[in-house]
Amino acid sequence: MDRAPTDFIRDIVARDREINKHGGRVVTRFPPEPNGYLHIGHAKSICLNFGIALENQGVCHLRFDDTNPAKEDVEYVDSIQADVRWLGFDWADKLFYASDYFEQLHDYAVQLIDAGKAYVDSLSADEIRAHRGTLTEPGRNGPYRDRPVEESRRLFAAMRAGEFPEGAHVLRAKIDMASPNINLRDPTIYRIKQVPHHRTGERWCIYPMYDFAHALSDAIEGITHSICTLEFEDHRPLYDWVLDNLPVPCHPQQIEFARLNLTYTVLSKRKLLELVGQGHVSGWDDPRMPTLAGLRRRGYPPEAIRAFCAVIGVAKRDSVVDVAMLEHAVRDDLNRRAPRAMAVLRPLRVVIDNYPEGQVEELAAVNNPEDATMGSRPVPFSRVLYIEQDDFREDPPKQFFRLAPGREVRLRYAYFIRCERVVKDDRTGEVVELHCTYDPATRGGDAPDGRKVKATLHWVSAAHAVPAEVRLYDRLFTVENPGVEKDGVDWRSHLNPSSLEALTGCQLEPSLASAVPGARYQFERHGYFCADSVDSKPGAPVFNRTVGLRDAWAKIEKAGG
Ligand code: ATP
Ligand code: MG
């Protein structure tokens, strides 16, 4: 696979193997909660966990942390598996669910009660909060903390039997209400939830809390390195407390790294869920979403995402990565692999007056100048063509070198043409057609007399062109850090109103008629495009812009005002 990176976590793993810790084994896990689709941030974690396992002849488990049935769904379970596979990773037979351990986790909880290390608390949620203290003040012991073991045991059994409504009781670990670490102030480890579970159905009405279930799931599976994001650093003492106070088969090491943040992007699952639920996007796989499903539909190759994750590396300090880096990785990958094609997005009709009516020539077009083995394809040329409206100016500004009245340009793979006459709509004054002449001696793109032209345009033959819809995507947000709510401004107010421009009536070269859904191309001079996996049909293609090429002219124009 891609080049093996180094970082502080890989250093820890290498050292552990050297001293034969865990018998030299490396077992990692990727533990998503099935309450949403995976996004580019998860890709960082997947590449890290599966990557470290691969590099060390170890295994990486895929484990669903499905302990909160109220928010979870099989749709997410299925999409997560599809996305991890698509990214290029394989968990072999190591697919697990925390819910598979519910019975075992329950038994562990009972053992804690019996050891006097857990108790049923009957305070209300508000009272529990009031007793917890703050960052600067210690918590206070509640009235149920010293409840007899027998009573806690009986109440916990009754909780499981469904005898109480939600919130009536919780089971708490008995650690230290005065601890400077709030996570150790008798954290809740079980709560009542009268909600059926997508896997265990109605069997349970008490569910374990994340910190308890996670540490024990890791131990049950024999995980060696439990890699998670920085916000769990303060939870590590609790992770260790759970494993130190129960007879578990092993004690994995929790290691934290900085999560990925990207400019112009939100990566909070809650916010992504809102974008979908409130119809700001067409779904989890909307090509503007930072989800793996969205990026895939947009045309991002998994190889590019892996390369991006390798480049950004893994660190211990939070930072924000410029989304341009991700786009760069995509261009870099597609530049090497995507076949070129000609597509006219905003067509302007061109008639070559001196080209014989009814004649068609097949010209050879290079499929990829970066890779000679990709060969060439025939492209038909005839008397009536389309070029881009943008490639013509009746009154050209100084630095505009493309077509203009009386001016000569090159048509890619074809001939020089000269603009002789402009046809306008009588009413609107809009340019609707150009009449040109071609120089037959320039076939292939060079003039035998050595005269030069300053621009090369792409084009399609009108009679052979395939009409298509092309969706131009732009960033979903207009500000660099849309997730940060400031001065009471709602984060959704930063949604980019022109993040999608759907162009119909585009004209593509005929080879694109048969583009299979998901196929990626470079449309010359435009960028990289991917046949939409949902809406593209044979004969009626729909393309998504994956990422643009940098457009020098747009920059000049912008700078000049
Ligand atoms: P939430 O947004 O609800 O807190 P989450 O994004 O942490 O959830 P999980 O399903 O718990 O979602 O994530 C699975 C794994 O992916 C966790 O180990 C988590 O640390 C990691 N992960 C999530 N977001 C990122 C991110 N932005 N960068 C790196 N890793 C991430
Ligand atoms: Mg999480």
Image (cartoon, helix red, strand yellow):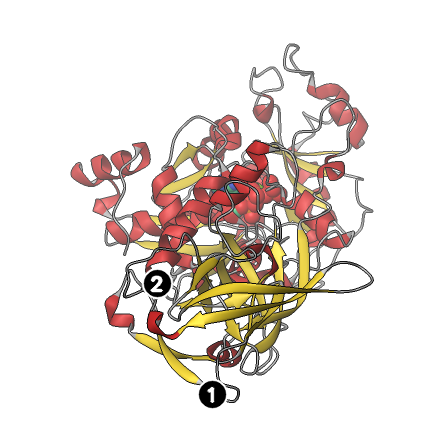
Q: How many marks?
A: 2
Q: Is residue 330 above or below residue 178?
A: below
Per the image, label 1 sits on a secondary structure element best described as: loop
Foreground tag (1 vs 2): 1
Q: Which residue appears at 27% of the width and 66% of the height?
A: 448
Quadrant, the C terminus: top right
Circle 1 packing at 10 Å, graded few (<14), some (14-19), many (20+), is: few
Q: Which residue appears at 41% of the width and 83% of the height?
A: 361
- Please name the amino acid that badge 1 sits on: Gln
Circle 2 packing at 10 Å, graded few (<14), some (14-19), many (20+), is: some
- Please name the amino acid that badge 2 sits on: Arg
Quadrant, the N terminus: bottom left
Q: Which residue appears at 64% of the width and 73% of the height?
A: 535
Task: Say whether residue 78 is visible.
Answer: no
CB of mark 2 near ligand 1 (< 8 Å): no
CB of mark 1 near ligand 1 (< 8 Å): no
> Left or right: where does residue 438 sit relative to residue 388?
left
Image location (x, y in percent) of residue 147? 70, 29
Per the image, label 2 sits on a secondary structure element best described as: helix
User: Which residue is at the front of the view, 1 or 430?
Assistant: 430
Q: Mark 1 sits on what residue?
A: 359
> Left or right: where does residue 308 sit relative to residue 124?
left
Image location (x, y in percent) of residue 556? 52, 38
- N-terminal of the pair, mark 1 or mark 2, is 2
User: Which residue is at the front of the view, 490 or 539?
Assistant: 539
Q: Mark 2 sits on what residue?
A: 337
User: Which residue is at the front of the view, 249 or 383?
Assistant: 383
> Residue 421 occupies which quadrant of the picture?
bottom right
